[in-house]
Amino acid sequence: MNTLTSVLSIAPPLVLQTVLLWVLIRSQAFRTFPWFFAYTLFSVIANVGRFAVASHFDIYFDVYWVTEAAYAILGIAVLYEVFWAVFRNLGRIWWFRLIFPLTVAFTIMLAIARSQTQPPQFSNPLMAWIVTGELALRLLQVSVFALLVALVSFLGLRWRQHAFGISAGFGLYATVALLATTKVSEFGTRFAFMWGVLLVVAYSIAALIWLWFFSRPQQPGQLRNEQPPLSLQELERYKQIARRIRRR
Amino acid sequence: MIGNLLVHFMWNVIIAAGFISCVALAARIWFHFPDRTKDDVVDFLVHIDLEKAETLLDPIAENSLRRTLSPAEFCILQRKRIHLYIEFLQRMSHNAAILVQWGNLEAQRSHERTAQLAHELQQEAVKVRAYSLLALMKLRFWLLIRLGSWYMLPTPSLSELRGIYGIEGLDAYDRLKTVASSLFVGHEKFEELLQNL
């Protein structure tokens, strides 16, 4: 990898991730989203590490694959955190608790099935497994994002939640990454550079989405407390009276 | 071979779902309703005649119609009844969506009982929305294949739709009404809320 290519592929995301890290620290988001904070911190460290060894191919190769594996594990933790942040109020509904594990199982099965039909071309089996794991993660990110968009629209939950922003960033990037992976396997390396540029652009847009969501206030300030509501029993009595009045 | 095609198909479906979700999210950000307060609830609700809905799901009334009318007449009447229940379900789903949006805002209040009731409102609204969606799918499927028109199978029964996957539709809606009214107490449009729900 020449220096110019490494600067172009690493520098824009690194700058944006560093700004995001600062925003997360300032807004104390590590309290509400510790895994996303860990992911952002790790991505800054990993990108600095990759940048530092970009001119030494052998070391870069090892650093790249080790950090990719760590990204995959952190990515799943972030998605789990996001899912429960959005749906924590619905945890008492039993079938809601099944949605995330079922989605994870489905995407892992699909990624393994695809790796059987179109095996990744690597001599090292560990790398082939890392690529399969990464594909499974991208599938999971897209699936969880689509699921969140569908459920949030269907249930009418708040769209401005930080969790939704995190998922939107991952969803956009993972969709482009999946498309790029699929097209590279179909067209070979002919458009590899173009897909590489597309991935950097998509990741930068994802980082901008996270920055936008985290730099806006989560809640419209503290709401004033009005008269506290009646209990349900009191209300039932009130409703009976109201019905009687209406019938007159 | 079929397995490969299925994997390829699912793969492309997920990529397409990702892109469609990006577009849907952008549209949602652009067109969304601002924070829904107490004042933005009543005017958006649509009245539902729950007694009529209850009658549509009554197995005794339905059996009586089935016995007294000819199969052809009952089939026509049942299609009308299905359309009417679809209308009620759409209104229930719409009202639940309005209430859950308001519940999102109320859930942020620092008063413990208000926040607790708002969470309850969200949960009941989700149940109503889930019930409406599943019941609508079932009813539209019945209309699509015109079950009953072929006289090979009996005309479908609306009373089967009282409960779907453990959710009793009208009971869930009644609980939603109660929780919503409880949160609404003290507002000048309380009476209107009771009438519109």
Image (cartoon, coloured by chain):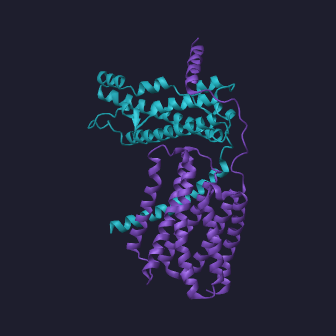
With respect to residue B71, does A77 lie above or below? Answer: below
> What residue is at 72 percent from the left and 54 percent from the top?
A216
Q: How many marks?
A: 0
> What residue is at 67 percent from the left and 57 percent from the top?
A29
| Residue A170 image offset from top left, x and y in percent | 58, 63
Q: Chain A hue?
A: purple
| Residue B15 image offset from top left, x and y in percent | 51, 63
Q: In this rendering, does residue B143 appear at all?
A: yes
Image quarter (top left, top right, bottom left or bottom right) of the C terminus of chain A = top right
Name the foreground residue: A234 vs A189. Answer: A234
Name the foreground residue: A144 vs A66. Answer: A66
Q: In this rendering, does residue A180 appear at all?
A: no
Q: Residue reaching furthest top? A: A248
| Residue A231 image offset from top left, x and y in percent | 59, 27
> What residue is at 69 percent from the left and 65 percent from the top?
A21
Which image quarter: residue A81?
bottom right
Q: Which chain is cyan?
A: B
Q: Residue reaching furthest left? A: B152
> What residue is at 56 percent from the left and 79 percent from the top?
A64
Which image quarter: residue B11?
bottom left
Name the foreground residue: A38 vs B187. Answer: A38
Image quarter (top left, top right, bottom left or bottom right) of the N terminus of chain A = bottom right
| Residue A133 image offset from top left, x and y in percent | 47, 70
